[in-house]
Image (cartoon, grey):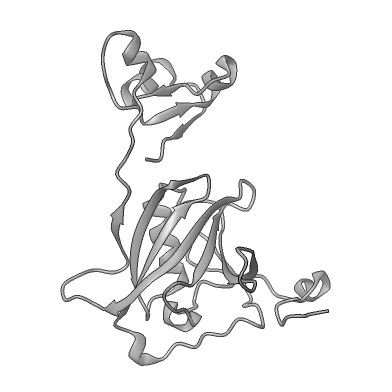
Amino acid sequence: MITYAEDMGFFGRLDLEPGERLPYVKDKYAQEQARQVFRFKAKAGFNRKIWREVEIKGGQKLADLDQILRSAFQLDSCDHLGGFWKLIPRGTTRRVREVEIGDVDPMGEGSAADLHIGGLDLKPGDRMKYVHGFGDWNEHFLTLEDISNAKERVKYPRLAAQNKPCHHYCQDCKAKGEKTVATWICGDCSLKQRREVLVCENCLKARHAEHYANEILY
């Protein structure tokens, strides 16, 4: 039976202090990586057609990567933990072994918060998983596309590229003969009508102000 260093078990994890780094996770950061730029392509787990490319320096931390991913995917930045895993291929199959790196909270703290990007020992083609909210378990899959040199007068981390949006239109406006891009899903109306009810910002405020709604990610 194969065992791995990260197979700590339930009781081993109980011995860890809150925010303590997992003992098998090492930060292999070297100072010469400070101006290297790591470009990740991140795809939303619920719809792989929705993607973002983010760039971050090797000297920056997983807390910084957590924040740019929250911003790029319109995720709550005031609540919910974020978590990172390495995805290690199993032989020549498409199966992977998920190795937990740790978590980052909205305040920029947590067991993985201070790990340098350059210290994760990643090379182009390597993959990670990012989860936002351990209750909803909102998954995103990251592939390291490239490692290059930082550009002058560019602020990192940054959103470098994203998919071309495939817009839907507000159903309330459509009923009035108007064509307005929908930016919200009304949860209450969707549940009642048993279909997605998509509305624009104005219609949300005018007709769905008391309803639970989620912002649409394009």
- At 47% from the left edge and 66% from the top edge, which residue is drawn? 108
Q: Position of residue 57 (x, y in %)?
A: 34, 76
Q: Residue furthest bottom?
A: 31
Outermost residue, top side:
176
| The N terminus lies in quadrant | bottom right
**Which picture quadrant has residue 14?**
bottom right
Which x, y percent locates residue 66? 45, 62
Is residue 162 placed above or below 5 in the rendered structure? Answer: above
Q: Is residue 128 above or below residue 194?
A: below
- In the rendered view of the protein, which quadrant contains the C terminus? top left
- Judge left or right: residue 28 versus residue 124: right
Instruction: Give the mark count.
Output: 0
Considering depth in this image, is 56 or 52 the residue closer to the camera?
Answer: 52
Q: Viewer-proximal residue, 150 or 148? A: 148
- Taking the spot 29% from the left edge, 82% from the top edge, the residue there is 35
Residue lying furthest front: 92
Choose top left, top right, bottom left or bottom right for residue 154.
bottom left
Above-or-below relation of 25 to 213: below
Q: x, y (%) of residue 11?
A: 83, 72
Q: Is residue 30 above or below residue 62?
A: below
Q: Residue 199 at x, y = what percent?
A: 39, 23
Question: Position of 174 compared to 17: left or right?
Answer: left
- Name the residue: 57% across, 85% down: 26
Q: Is residue 213 left or right of residue 204?
A: right
